[in-house]
Structure formats: C-alpha cells, structure tokens
Amino acid sequence: MALVTGSEISDREAALPTDPPTRKPPRPVTPAVLDRMALAYLERWASSAENLRRVLARKVERRCRLRGEAPEAALGLVEEAVARAVRAGLVDDGAYAEARVASLRRRGGSRRAIAARLSAKGVAGEAIDEALARHADARTEDDPDADPELDAATALARRRRLGPFRTTGRAENRERDLARLARAGFSYGVARAVVDGEAP
C-alpha cells in the first residue's frame, strides 16, 4: 500500500474547486408560470381556493427571493391564478369540503375536529357546515337511526383499540380511553357510549 505524502494531499486540495457552482436564477413569475405551479400542485393534492392561494404565495415569495426581486408585484398575479383555477373547475371548496368530511369521518373525526381542520385549510364556515349536514343526511338516509358522531367515535376507538376494542385492561384504561375521545373532539356522552358499549 502506497503512502500519500503531505505535498500530494495539498496538490489534490488545490485541484478541487473552491467555489460551488453558481445556479441559474429561476424564471420570472408570469401568469403562465403560476398556472403551471397551480396545476402541478392540484395534480397531487385536492385543495381549497384559500389553501391554493397560500401555496402559490409561498412559491412566489421563494422564487422572488432567489431572483433578488420584491414579491409584491408577483403576489398580485396569485389571485388571478386562483380565480382561473376556480373558473376552470379545478378548485371547488364545496366539493373539497364534502370529500374531506367523508374521509375524516371514516377515520374517526369528530364534527369539531373536522371543522377545525377544514377551517385551517381556508374553507369558509358555511361550506363546512353544509358538508357536515349533507354527510349526516346521507348517513340517516341509509340508516334512520345512524348517528354520524357516534359512528366516527366508534371508528376511532376501533383504530386506536379503545374501550370495547381493547384486548386486555379495559376497566383499568376506561378513564384514559374517555380522555382520548374527548381530546379528539367528541362529547362526554358519545365517548362514554363508545367506551362503555360493546364492539359492534
């Protein structure tokens, strides 16, 4: 095995590039660029209009920072891009809210937790209430005795193995299970009905 001398190491270090390669700045923000950004995002994720606005604004600010420009002028284009997406039917807050309500209810989301989550995504309160009401109506059409809140709490208990879905230690963990359902946004009455009830 050959030994490497100190002079050979310094020669190698001298041959290495000292400055990182300079990156070409991104293209300026134009309506066409914003439309492509919106489409790329919407291909992967369902979104509300407000959430799309936030996503595009973050992308615009980052791009302007890399270009050394002030983002104010480009941020005005974001509103137009969101309006075009809404007009094209790519963004519909009502449909988005309905799809999220159905999905979150299946996973065990309470009315309160779903409303908070959709509100954080920028969905208006009226659209949230309408989506929750339509979901409840659809459930009671199939089964007049159905309680969407109780069904969601049961789904969460099944997923988290709470109450009747515990294999051992059900009595010792009763208070903990009630607290878990309460933190998820369920009322005490619903939580008690699930934890003290039998597995369906």
Image (tube, grey):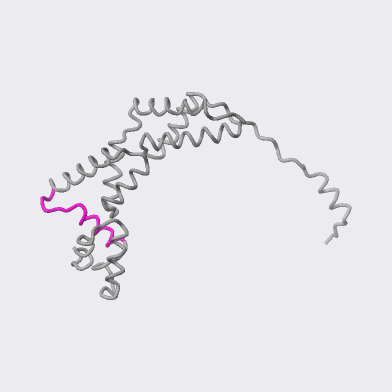
Q: Is residue 190 left or right of residue 121?
A: left
Q: In the rendered view, does 144 fall on the left or right side of 58?
A: left
> Percent position (x, y) of residue 190?
21, 60
- Quarter of the image with the N terminus is bottom right
| Residue 54 on image: x %, y % | 44, 37
The C terminus lies in quadrant: bottom left
Residue 134 drawn above or below residue 184 = above
Looking at the rendered structure, the number of numbered marks drawn on it comes to 0
Instruction: Give the magenta range.
Output: 142-159
For this rendering, which residue is in front, 12 or 120?
A: 120
Q: Is 112 rendered above or below residue 179?
A: above
* Residue at screen point 78% across, 44% down: 16
Q: Is residue 39 magenta?
A: no
Q: Nearer the viewer, residue 43 or 140?
A: 140
Magenta region, mostly helix, strand or loop? Answer: helix
Residue 148 lies in the magenta-colored region: yes
- Residue 138 position by quadrant: top left
Q: Percent from the top left, x then y, of residue 47?
A: 37, 38
- Give percent across and percent down for residue 175: 28, 70
Name the outermost residue toward the left. 144
Decide if residue 86 is on the left or right side of residue 199: right
What residue is shown at x 28% (from left), y 59% (from top)?
Answer: 156
66 to the left or right of 1: left
